[in-house]
């Protein structure tokens, strides 16, 4: 009996040793031959056809608008600044500026997608550009502190309404002074002169307005650029978007053939894409002014005083050299005349 148990134990030990040896051989075999095979994954389902997404708010049924007009009403003649500007932080009582001081900040409507004029710096998150610097100069003149400013993002089409309803104190957003707009709001004297031009892809056959017949041309809704290009190139197929950046995306995706607006804005788009370029002659001049709510003549005069100061003390050129020198427009600050 004892010897049987003994034999059984021995044979178990032998079996275990054999299994161990076999296992080791199997592992060595796998390592040497690299023969582990996993089942192949199921092949992915067929991909969807490549449909290019469109930015929200794109419209193609664009009604015909009148070209911008600044001559008939002498739109760029604004109100004369006060003989003596109030000291920063000491606004005369019962003025629009005193109300703004009481609210603690200047609310400025602008865009954050207009490279060079007002855009969000991707590195710092700050809103920067020529129009932003101008907003801070106005803020400094009111409060004695350029930081007391709050920005509200507006599309081109929202500017007039935001001023009419008092949603913002001023609009500083590449906004052209026109007779049409002066019916609803007020403007400062001009602070910049731009020219409407065309942006096309480098190898495009579009070199000016003559090649736009039948072509899709993009502008942001609410911009003066639409009416002007419709009057110069009536055969162009107008496409409108909410922002200028959306027009660049449509051009990059081949969904429009050209973009048209002020050279100042087009230069900012061209700076973001080496494959596009500004082409053709000036299609007309655009005088940028600070948009001011209607009936605020004290604010118009005050801001014109700020503009006089930045033109005479070198601030305008410093801002131009920082943001707009790539335009090489040859224009300095606009010549200003007042109506009283
Ligand atoms: N200067 C033109 C305008 O005021 C275009 C600029 C813009 O839409 O931002 O309509």
Image (spheres, grey):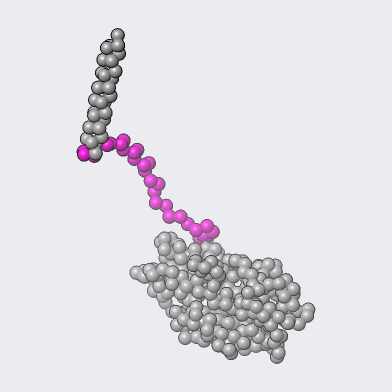
Q: In the drawing, does residue 180 fall left or right of residue 274?
A: right
Residue 255 is covered by the magenta coloring: no
Q: Is residue 178 visible?
A: no
The residue at the point 51 percent across, 79 percent down is 194
x, y percent for residue 236: 46, 67
x, y percent for residue 216: 45, 64
Quarter holding the N terminus is: top left
Q: In the drawing, does residue 117 fall left or right of residue 184?
A: left
The residue at the point 39 percent across, 48 percent down is 49
Secondary structure mostly seen in the magenta stretch: loop
Residue most toward the front?
Answer: 2
Q: Is residue 257 visible?
A: yes
x, y percent for residue 122: 49, 66
The residue at the point 70 percent across, 69 percent down is 166
Q: Which residues are magenta?
A: 32-61
Q: In the picture shown, does residue 42 fall above or below 201?
A: above
Foreground residue among 227 and 276: 276
Residue 34 is covered by the magenta coloring: yes
Count the labels in the image: 0
Quarter holding the C terminus is: bottom right
């Amino acid at each position: 009996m004892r010897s049987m148990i003994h034999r059984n134990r021995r044979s178990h030990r032998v079996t275990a040793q054999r299994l161990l040896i076999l296992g080791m051989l199997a592992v060595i075999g796998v390592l040497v031959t690299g023969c582990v095979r996993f089942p192949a994954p199921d092949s992915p389902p067929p991909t969807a056809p490549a449909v290019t997404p469109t930015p929200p708010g794109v419209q193609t049924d664009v009604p015909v608008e009148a070209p911008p007009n600044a001559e008939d009403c002498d739109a760029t003649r604004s109100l004369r600044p006060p003989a003596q500007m109030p000291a920063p932080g000491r606004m005369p009582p019962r003025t629009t500026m005193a109300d703004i001081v009481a609210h603690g900040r200047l609310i400025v409507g602008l865009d954050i997608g207009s490279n060079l004029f007002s855009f969000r710096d991707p590195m710092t998150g700050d809103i920067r550009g020529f129009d932003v610097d101008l907003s801070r100069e106005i803020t400094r003149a009111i409060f004695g502190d350029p930081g007391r400013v709050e920005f509200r993002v507006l599309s081109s089409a929202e500017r007039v309404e935001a001023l009419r309803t008092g949603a913002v104190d001023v609009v500083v957003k590449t906004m052209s002074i026109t007779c049409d707009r002066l019916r609803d709001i007020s403007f400062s004297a001009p602070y910049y002169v731009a020219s409407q031009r065309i942006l096309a892809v480098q190898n495009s056959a579009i070199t000016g307005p003559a090649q736009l017949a039948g072509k899709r041309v993009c502008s942001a809704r609410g911009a003066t650029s639409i009416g002007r290009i419709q009057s110069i190139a009536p055969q162009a197929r107008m496409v409108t978007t909410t922002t200028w950046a959306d027009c660049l995306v449509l051009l990059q995706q081949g969904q429009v053939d050209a973009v048209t607006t002020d050279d100042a804005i087009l230069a900012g788009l061209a700076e973001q894409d080496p494959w596009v370029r500004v082409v053709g002659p000036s299609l007309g001049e655009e005088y940028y002014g600070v948009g001011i709510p209607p009936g605020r003549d004290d604010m118009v005069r005050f801001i014109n005083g700020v503009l006089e100061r930045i033109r005479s003390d070198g601030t305008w050129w410093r801002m131009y050299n920082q943001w707009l020198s790539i335009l090489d427009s040859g224009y300095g600050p606009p010549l200003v005349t007042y109506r009283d």
